[in-house]
Image: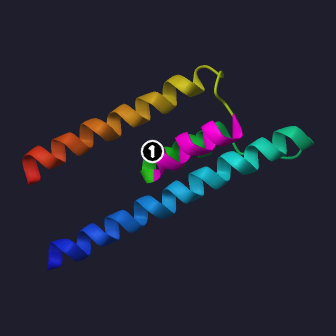
Amino acid sequence: MGWLFELANFVTVICVMSFAAFAAFGWDKAAAENGKRRVSEAALLNLALFGGIVGAYAGRALFRHKTRKQPFSRHLHTVALLQLFAAVFLTIFLW
């Protein structure tokens, strides 16, 4: 039963970080359109890195924000690949 509780905590963290990343992309898009203070690219990438990659991609697509900007797109794809490799590694070696 302990592993189930740990899994629930992990899923909760991923959901919260994804929501935060999604909101940050929306906030940054609105700020860009209105000439307000922006969310840094480092902050957006860190939100994605620490569990918010799904929300980052969803926000990027929905708000059409930072879709053509390089090297940001390359960094975001790198974060996604690192998380995919980590998930595969953990699944294989900890299962």
Q: Which residue is mark 1?
A: 49
> In the displayed image of the protein, which residue is found farthest to the bottom?
1
Q: What amino acid is at disc 1?
A: Leu
Compared across the picture, whether 13 is left or right of 89 comes to right
Question: Majority secondary structure of the magenta segment?
Answer: helix
Can residue 53 be found in the magenta stretch? yes
Identify whether 23 is placed above or below 48.
below
Please name the residue shown 66% across and 51% down the image.
Answer: 24
Where is the C terminus found, in terms of image quarters?
A: bottom left
> In the displayed image of the protein, which residue is found farthest to the right?
34
Residue 50 x, y percent position in the rendering: 44, 51
Residue 46 x, y percent position in the rendering: 52, 45
Please name the residue shown 41% across and 64% down the image.
Answer: 13
Say what secondary structure mark 1 lies in: helix
Q: Quadrant of residue 63?
A: top right
Please name the residue shown 35% across and 32% down the image.
Answer: 81
Compared across the picture, whether 31 is left or right of 2 comes to right
Residue 77 x, y percent position in the rendering: 45, 29
Magenta part of the protein: which range?
52-64
Identify whether 30 is placed above or below 71.
below
Q: Quadrant of residue 67?
A: top right
Residue 28 x, y percent position in the rendering: 74, 45
